[in-house]
Amino acid sequence: MENNDRTLKELATPDVVYQPWCIQCPPLEPAQSYELKSSLIHLLPKFHGLVGEDPHKHLKEFHVVCSTMRPQGIPEDHVKMKAFPFSLNGAAKDWLYLQSVLFNTWGDMKCMFLEKFFSASRTATIRKEIYRIRQHSGETLHEYWERFNKLCATCPHHQISEQLLIQYFYEGLMMMDRSMIDAASGGALMDKTPTAARHLISNMASNTQQFGTRGTIAPRMVNEIGTMDNPRLENQLTKLTSLVRQLAIGQHQPIAAVKACGICTSVEHPTDMCPTLQETELDHPESVGAIGGYQYGKQPYATRLFEGQQYGRPPYQGSYAAQGFSSNRSMPQSQGSYQ
């Protein structure tokens, strides 16, 4: 039926069209037939495509199961191509279903799988880890050797020669284990071939696992932890010490006492600068002395006598002053001022 003759409902209804399957298994002999068993499917490892998963490890486990459960006379690649979709979940299964490339062989499918879930940047990162591998403090020779082999197994295509692998492992050894390996090799490990050196290290690591004991590590005190252990912690301790020192210096410095105004009890100004005093001086000049704490009437006589005198002119020498002066001479001198 052409589109012009179809109704809107028929046009909106999706057709049941399946995308072509990307896996095409190699044909078997006419007398051969193969069907996946549920027992094989349940034994298959699962790969979800997460960041921390190892695709090489998944392929190894998948190979073990398929080679074990392969019927006699059936090619192994045929079994793997049929069983591989059942070993994927999540993002990995979505990747397989969205593939437009047709896989005719197991080798092509395996290469595409590794290209997707083992990027070139991850390969470069593992190579750098192999270059910089170091034996940890308190780690036995067997543990270090096992960790080194696991790291190399996560990236079989690291393209590092056997000579460099042994050299990187040897350079990362602690001084005690390095001296022990040199002594066991007759003076220096570098005098042996890469194959002989690997065999010697493997034997010594196995012997360490069987009979070696981990040396007791004395716990270090707080004052024995240096900047190389934790530079950030050392930085924070330095800043904290400086801050405490500044606080201690600030506490020892004398703090000026805050004096309150004697008139309005305010701490913002001294008594002689009180606004109340200034207002009173403008409104009632005669009461300024009383507000300031002095009584005008009880000031000394001499102060009142010359109060209205101008600067630079001699004092008034009237009859009253002369009389007062003469009377003062005849009177006995009193102690202090007039009160």
Image (tube, helix red, strand yellow):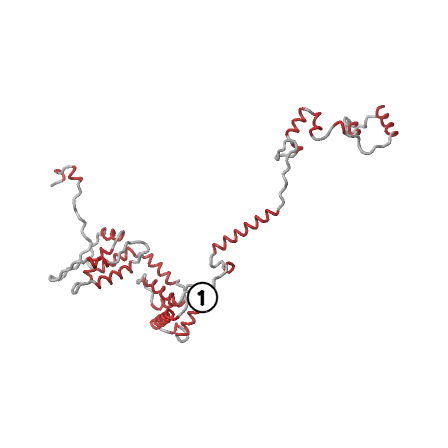
Q: Secondary structure at mark 1?
A: loop
Residue 66 at x, y = what percent?
22, 61
Local packing at callout 1 (Cα closer than 10 Å; few below 14, some 14-19, many 20+) is few
Apparent side of residue 234 relative to residue 121 in the rendered image (left or right): right
In the rendered image, the vertical position of residue 97 relative to residue 206, given as above or below: above
Res 324 quadrant in image: top right
In the rendered image, the vertical position of residue 242 relative to residue 283, given as above or below: below
Apparent side of residue 168 relative to residue 282 in the rendered image (left or right): left
In the rendered image, the vertical position of residue 245 relative to residue 158, given as above or below: above
**Label 1 belongs to which residue?**
216
Residue 244 at x, y = what percent?
55, 50
Quadrant in which the N terminus is drawn = top left
Res 286 quadrant in image: top right
- Toward the bottom, the furthest residue is 186
Q: Say how many tags the image has.
A: 1
Apparent side of residue 174 relative to residue 6 in the rendered image (left or right): right
**Residue shown at 62% from the left, 33% from the top:** 266
The amino acid on which the numbered mark 1 sits, given as a three-letter code, is Thr
Residue 226 at x, y = what percent?
50, 59
Quadrant in which the C terminus is drawn = top right
In the rendered image, the vertical position of residue 336 relative to residue 138, given as above or below: above
Query: Which residue occupies the foreground of this view, 230 or 267?
Result: 267
- Toward the right, the furthest residue is 330
Res 309 quadrant in image: top right
